[in-house]
Each structure stands twice: as C-alpha cells, then as structure tokens.
Amino acid sequence: MMNLSKETVLNILGEHKEYFETGETRNIDFRLKQLEKLKKAIKDNERFIIDALYKDLHKPEFEAYATEVGYLYDSIGYFMKNLKNGLR
C-alpha cells in the first residue's frame, strides 16, 4: 500500500476537482468508457477480490462472487444500459 503525504493527497484531489469542473465527465461516451474500464479492472483483479473477501470476511468463493463481484458486474451493466435515460 502506498503512503501518501497529506500535501500529495490534497494536490491529487485538487487536480481531480479541476478536471471534474471542465464538464468532460458529463459526456455519456466518457461515462461509458469509465464504466468499461471499471469492469475490466474488476475482471483483471477478480481473483484478488475474492481472496480478500475470504481473508477478511471468510466469504466462500461462490458467496463472494454472488454477493459482491457478480453484483458489481450486474450494476455496471445496468448503468451502461440505462445511462442515457438517467441523464437530465
């Protein structure tokens, strides 16, 4: 795990805030790409996530997938499918 100084964290947060304020994150295509990236990151780290759920919460593999990982995939799919309807 990385140890970041308070100053570093505040700088990162400031950069993120500036980027958010550009309005680029409001774009539907941007949001869809971000959701795809999130889905890929989960898929790439699925084994680590399931192992951590067992180590920390003693969740068996099936339960970890069904209640955590699978739920994330379903939620991402739902938002990707319904993103255009939810924007105002």
Image (tube, rainbow, N blue to C red):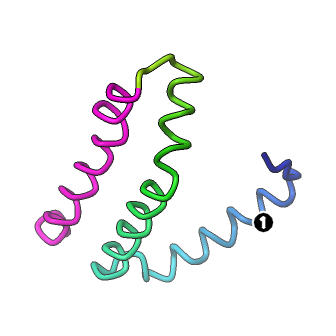
Name the residue at 51% across, 73% down.
Answer: 20
Residue 44 drawn above or below residue 22: above
Name the residue at 43% across, 62% down.
Answer: 38
Name the residue at 43% across, 82% down.
Answer: 24
Prevailing SS of the magenta stretch:
helix
Residue most extreme to the top: 58
Image-based side of 5 in relation to 36, left or right: right
Q: Quadrant of the N terminus?
A: top right
Residue 10 part of the magenta segment: no
Q: Quadrant of the C terminus?
A: bottom left
Residue 87 part of the magenta segment: yes
Q: Which residue is mark 1?
A: 11
Residue 44 drawn above or below residue 46: below
Residue numbers of the magenta segment: 61-88
Residue 37 drawn above or below residue 28: above
In depth, the one of 85 and 72 nearer the eye is 72
In depth, the one of 77 and 28 nearer the eye is 77
Q: Secondary structure at mark 1?
A: helix
Image-based side of 78 in relation to 38, left or right: left
User: Residue 71, how many percent across, how many down?
Assistant: 28, 41
Residue 1 drawn above or below residue 52: below
